[in-house]
Amino acid sequence: MKNKPAKNHIIMAKITVEVGKTENNYSAHIIVGDGICVATGKTFNELKEHMQDALDFHLHGMEEDGDDIPVEFSGKYELVYKFNTESILHYYNGIITNAALERLTGINQRQLQRYASGKSNPKSTQIKKIEKALHNLGQDLISVNLN
């Protein structure tokens, strides 16, 4: 029996970036060692660019200061953006209507609007309903083929 050569698998660390919504922008933060890295952007794409720039600047500063770089940042890593309910509903506002979200989640439009505006915070069961509905919609869309 031949020994198969070991494949070099590069494990990419997944770094969670918490995303929120301010009055005029998206905001995000990430814990880096004993510090925190923050960024804002008018759009989500702008926020992602600003977060990567802020993180690069932060890591460079740590390196220059002789601080230990956290292990998850020492190799390849991927930033994974975790939205709160207000920010995700705002992000998809105009793309997915509250009427469509009501059909997908079973949560009435008025309550969804309160979540999107930050006037009310959903309970964990409501968050899960919204998350599940968005995941199901995404899976449905992935399976679509057009002629």
Image: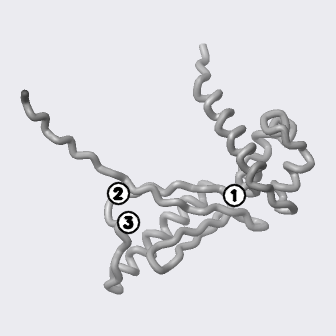
Q: Residue 59, percent across and down?
A: 40, 74
Going by the numbered disc 2, the residue's amino acid type is Lys
Q: What residue type is labelled 3?
A: Phe
Q: What residue is shown at x 54% (from left), y 68% (from top)?
A: 30
28, 136: nearer the viewer: 136
Residue 33 falls in which quadrant of the image? bottom left
| Residue at the image point whose x is 90% and y is 43% from the top | 108
Which residue lies under the disc numbered 2? 76
- Which residue reaches farthest bottom? 65
Q: Residues within 10 Å of mark 2 (few under 14, many from 20)?
A: few
Within 10 Å of disc 3 (Cα), the crowding (few <14, some 14-19, many 20+) is: some
Look at the picture and state if 60 lies above or below 85: below
Q: In this view, does 139 lie above or below 48?
A: above
Looking at the rendered structure, the secondary structure element under dot 3 is: helix
> In x, y percent, where is residue 81?
57, 56
Give the residue number, with chain letter if any, for mark 1. 84
Residue at the image position 78 percent from the left and 47 percent from the top: 93
According to the image, label 3 marks what residue? 73
**Numbered marks: total:** 3
Mark 1 Cα within 10 Å, few/some/many (few <14, many 20+)? some
As drawn, 19 above or below 138:
below
- Mark 3 and mark 2 in contact (Cβ < 8 Å)? no
Judge left or right: residue 37 versus residue 8: right
Badge 1 element:
loop
Earlier sequence position, callout 2 versus callout 1: 2
Amino acid bearing label 1: Asn
Secondary structure category for the residue under label 2: loop
Q: In which quarter of the image is the N terminus?
A: top left
Q: Given contact means CB atoms under 8 Å apart, are the residues at marks 3 and 1 in contact?
A: no
Mark 2 to mark 1: distance in Å?
A: 26 Å
